Image (tube, rainbow, N blue to C red):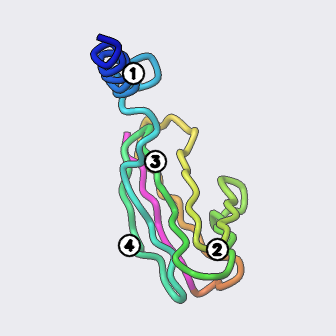
Amino acid sequence: MKRLLFVVVIAAGFLAGCSEDESNNIGGGQLPAKYIFVDDSTFSPIEVNLVNGGAVQFVNRTAVAHTLMSNDSNTFEIVLPPLMSVYFRPDTVISSAISLPYHCVEHPIKQGLITIQP
């Protein structure tokens, strides 16, 4: 009898641990729509299209840090640690398409473009 009770309690614990908390998963949470990989000499892909509210996950596949900055130096500046990733969601709500050209501060030849559609 004790063995059966023990099995039931363990099974209930597993089932409770597998349930999903819906209150924290509004609209898919912060799952990025696009990935941009930072390699030694390029961004991949070079161009990314987002819709309003979309996001990018920058993934650094190198052993050195990179600073990603919008070409206007005002829209964003992201420090990307070695072999890490950073989530970025533009906080501007737009009514017409905009383009955000950006570059790597340490390697200015590395350039990319994020286009946001309304």
Q: Where, quadrant-wise, is the C terminus in this rendering?
A: top left
* Number of residues whose C-alpha sits closer than 10 Å to that of mark 1, classed few (under 14), some (14–19) or many (20 or more): few
For disc 3, the marked residue is 55
The total of numbered circles placed on residues is 4
Q: Earlier in the sequence, mark 1 or mark 2?
A: 1
For disc 4, the marked residue is 45
Q: Amino acid at mark 4?
A: Pro
* Number of residues whose C-alpha sits closer than 10 Å to that of mark 4, classed few (under 14), some (14–19) or many (20 or more): few
The picture quadrant where one finds residue 66 is bottom right
Q: In 3D space, how far apart are the residues under numbered discs 3 and 2 (Cα atoms)?
A: 21 Å
Residue 79 inside the magenta-drawn segment: no
Q: In 3D space, how far apart are the residues under numbered discs 3 and 4 (Cα atoms)?
A: 14 Å
Marks 1 & 4, CB-CB < 8 Å contact: no
Q: Is residue 18 above or below residue 87?
A: above
Q: Residue 28 placed where, x, y %?
A: 36, 32
Q: Amino acid at mark 2?
A: Pro
**Which residue is painted at 47% across and 67% down in the image?**
113
Q: Residue 105 placed where, x, y %?
A: 70, 77
Q: Nearer the viewer, residue 23 or 56?
A: 23
Between marks 3 and 1 in the image, the one whose residue lies nearer the viewer: 1
**Which residue is painted at 54% across and 66% down in the image?**
101
Magenta span covers which residues? 110-118
For disc 2, the marked residue is 82
Q: Amino acid at mark 1?
A: Gly
Q: Nearer the viewer, residue 101 or 5?
A: 5
The dot on residue 13 is: 1
Q: In 3D space, how far apart are the residues under numbered discs 1 and 2 (Cα atoms)?
A: 39 Å
Q: In 3D space, how far apart are the residues under numbered discs 4 and 2 (Cα atoms)?
A: 19 Å
* Number of residues whose C-alpha sits closer than 10 Å to that of mark 2, classed few (under 14), some (14–19) or many (20 or more): some
Q: In 3D space, how far apart are the residues under numbered discs 1 and 4 (Cα atoms)?
A: 44 Å
Q: Earlier in the sequence, mark 3 or mark 2?
A: 3
